[in-house]
Amino acid sequence: MSFRNSIIYAMLLLVAACASMGTPDGGPYDEAPPVFLASQPSANATNASNNEIVLEFDEFIKLQNAYEKIVVSPPQIQQPEIKAVGRRITVELFDTLKPSTTYTIDFNDAVVDNNENNPLEAFSFVFSTGDVVDTLGVSGTVLDASNLEPIKGILVGIHSNLADTAFTRTPFERISRTDSRGRFYMRGVAPGKYRMYALADANGNYMFDQKSEKIAFLDSLIVPYATPAWRSDTLWHDSLTIDTVKRVRYTRLCPDNVVLRAFNEPMKQQYLVKNPREKHNSFKLYFSEAAKAEPVVRGLNFDATDAFIVESNPTNDTILYWMKDTAIYHRDTLTVEVTYLAPDSLGTYNPRSDTLNLVPRRSRERVLADEKRAFEEQEKEFLKEARKMKGYDKNNPPKYVQPTPVLKIKTGAGSGLDVNRDFVLSFEEPLSSIDTAAIRLFIMVDSVPKAIPYVFRQSEKNIRDYMLYAEWRPGEEYRVEIDSAAFKGIYGAVSLRFEQKLEYKSLDEYAVLHLNIPGTGNKAVVELLNREDKAVASQRTENNRCSFYFVRPEKYYMRLFIDENGNGKWDAGSYTDKVQPEKVFYYPRMIELRAMFEYDQDDWDINLALEEQKPAAITKQRPDRERVRRNRNAERKFK
């Protein structure tokens, strides 16, 4: 081969080599977490006095979600500075170190290596300013008292000062923070007796001093202790095959099953929030809590005697005033004095008066101008249509008369009505008159209407709702007929003729559910829940039992609360009064009810551990996804 040909051949080989897409072997993946090597002071050191802690690792590291995951105990009023540089983490504590105290810095899994983010799991650094390092610990769960949701990120703290005022006047002695499962692990606790609390600390001072802060407290004392115990450790041959299961002895730190039920105290600060006058003929008073009594409204620039129709919402914290006299509501500014009951510093309710100027969003002039414009447009359209009519005389055109305002009626009734529900008519304004003779109710018998008796009555919950009571029969069809002008509103609006067909469901479309719940007596209120954890029906227990009739076939969950005060609703607790929130329990499984079936559910055991009761399907606080370490070296081997 000539020299020239050899050169060409070599160049072809080089091009072919460059075109190869093979991946060079850069060595095995780094799948090991960082290794803690040394520190200053040393781990578990005693008589430490330096506010700066330096931790060294075997590789470059970084911190992930440090503020969320790292907890320093005892809590620091001045937030410490924690930073990672190269192979080191530096922690600088700005608070003065307390004497004879164990300090714990819980990193959890915030320490990861710089390249692959391999976490150093459950890493904690401990030292003491005294002669002894305290090694006891307490763990447990914080749940929302109203719905047993795990609470993420809430503080859990303890006080050796057993006085009730310690929680409200003194920062916690030791703290922990809950994870995504609501779990907490408090380390470095000294022997003794403690009171334990949970606190959603709004202002970062580690004490309960704002009523808006969510809290929990235990009635009993916490006494930490250690006891020997055994656990099973599994050794894996590979990712699928178990090699060995060993019994390992360890020291169990107790108590490790504390449950704290957190709640927000009811706001006992009755005050007037706002007072909008959205329309000329009405205004609303919004209160911070349910009004203890109906407020007294006194007109300062008009006579308010018998001037209003008063309408309260179901929770009695919003009150709507309909003004009856046109001479009053045509005014652009109404000045009133509102007197209501409000608590003083001791919680005693006394009369309080506020002076209000009620001004509508749109002035009377603007309203009249809009009404005039609308009238002229309607008159113009009327005359336009009149010109098309036979016999139209342009010299003597017909006069346009504005029609009477229409009073609208709403029913909310769909195609299929439940047999345990009555028919409701809702109006947009209070009524001044009702002609019950204009109302007729029929049952359809072989497609022929047959008149039946009924009772028409105003609802007790809303003055603008009226109930049509009758002997509704499952599977039957009814028809409601109401003549025009049967209803007249207080502002002159008149109803049009109304007709609606009503079809009530047959019993074959329902299920029946019977429950036996030992230990509840007559105090429990049981709720059927949908998939959004919302109550769709409720019943009170009688002698440990309750029944739900006319239940739509569906998948349900169940919750109950012990109604200690008998008011029919769940009540939060009060730290001031040392009252715990009413107890809530969940049935731990979903139940599916089918039409035409009657279910007698097995005994509902409410004594199951609270943190295990709520089904995962309706638990909104999801656990953080656990980091799954891939064996990428093995994966590459088999490619």
Image (cartoon, rainbow, N blue to C red):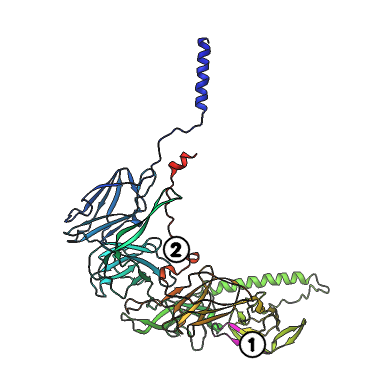
N-terminal-most mark, 2 or 1? 1
The quadrant where residue 272 appears: bottom left
Q: Which residue is drawn at 22% across and 61% down?
A: 134
> Which of the pair 430/3 is nearer the observer?
3
Residue 426 on image: x %, y %: 60, 80
Q: What stretch is highlighted in magenta?
A: 453-466
Is residue 463 a member of the stretch shown in magenta?
A: yes
Indicate which disc residue 434 carries. 1
Residue 72 visible to an observer of this rendering: yes
Amino acid beneath label 2 = Gln
Residue 458 on image: x %, y %: 58, 86
Please rate how many residues cluster around mark 2, counting C-alpha atoms within 10 Å: few if below 14, some from 14 to 19, many from 20: some
Contact check, label 2 and label 1, Cβ < 8 Å: no
Q: Which residue lies furthest to the right in this view?
A: 390
Residue 200 visible to an observer of this rendering: no
Q: Name the residue under label 2.
A: 621
The quadrant where residue 132 appears: bottom left
Q: Is label 2 or label 1 in front?
A: 2
> Which of the pair 48/340 is nearer the observer?
48
Q: Residue at x 35, y 60 (%)?
A: 231
Please rate how many residues cluster around mark 1, counting C-alpha atoms within 10 Å: few if below 14, some from 14 to 19, many from 20: few
Residue 75 on image: x %, y %: 27, 61
188 displayed left or right of 501? left
633 displayed left or right of 322? left
Q: Distance between the residues labelled 2 and 1?
A: 51 Å
Amino acid beneath label 1 = Ile
Is residue 37 a member of the stretch shown in magenta?
A: no
Residue 591 on image: x %, y %: 54, 71
Q: Element under label 2?
A: loop
